Image (cartoon, rainbow, N blue to C red):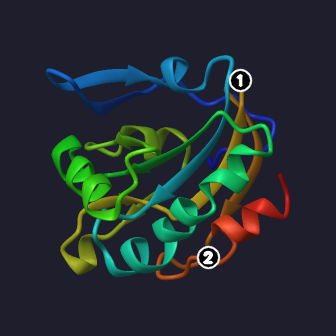
Amino acid sequence: MSIQVGDHLPQATFRVNGPDGPQAKTTDDVFKGRRVVLVGVPGAFTPACHRNHLPGFVAKKDEILARGIDAIAITAVNDVFVLNAWQEATGAESLEFLADGNAEFAKAIGQELDGSGFGLGPRSQRYAMLVDDGVVRVLNVEDSPSKAEVSSAEALLKVI
């Protein structure tokens, strides 16, 4: 079942790039006591993610943070090395990138996408949510992974 507004995020562990290489970061580490915009994308460097979705959050970062948001985090079913390369390639170092390499988080929140028909394996649906101290307050999920409309930075700014 898909996560809903008002639900607590389930416990999960992401991988992030740390000073000594990959390190684990739990949902509590990321969300406890913080207001975080979490953006789920099907994959780093994929056309809609790379050209349409992520750039809006980079461009609107200051406007989003000015609304009392502590951080913007991006998650994808990619390994930490791919997400780190994507973060650097897009100039998004001020955003948090959370690798969900085995799709455990995507599955736990009911936002998994089967990309095997395209040779991509398990992926995440495209979405944007506002999480307040671990509780989902806003959830905008795309009806197609190739779209970045209801989950765009501009759409999210209208409701936070």
> For residue 43, what is the image quadrant?
bottom left
**Residue 82 in the image: x percent, y percent?**
19, 53
Q: Which residue is mark 1?
A: 133
Residue 3 vs 52, above or below: the answer is above
**Going by the image, does 102 lie left or right of 128?**
left
Cα distance in 3D space between marks 2 and 1: 27 Å
Residue 49 vs 146, above or below: the answer is above
* Label disc, if present, on residue 143 of the rendered structure: 2
**Going by the image, does 7 lie left or right of 30?**
right
Element carrying mark 2: loop
Element carrying mark 1: loop
Q: Residue at x 49, y 38 (%)?
A: 108
**Residue 12 in the image: x percent, y percent?**
44, 27
Of tags 2 and 1, the one toward the viewer is 1
Q: Amino acid at mark 2?
A: Asp
Q: Amino acid at mark 1?
A: Asp
Query: How many numbered marks have been drawn onto this rendered protein structure?
Result: 2
**Residue 70 in the image: x percent, y percent?**
65, 33
Q: Residue at x 24, y 79 (%)?
A: 118
Using a 10 Å C-alpha cutoff, classify the residue at mark 2 as few (fewer than 14 neighbours), some (14 to 19) or many (20 or more). Answer: few
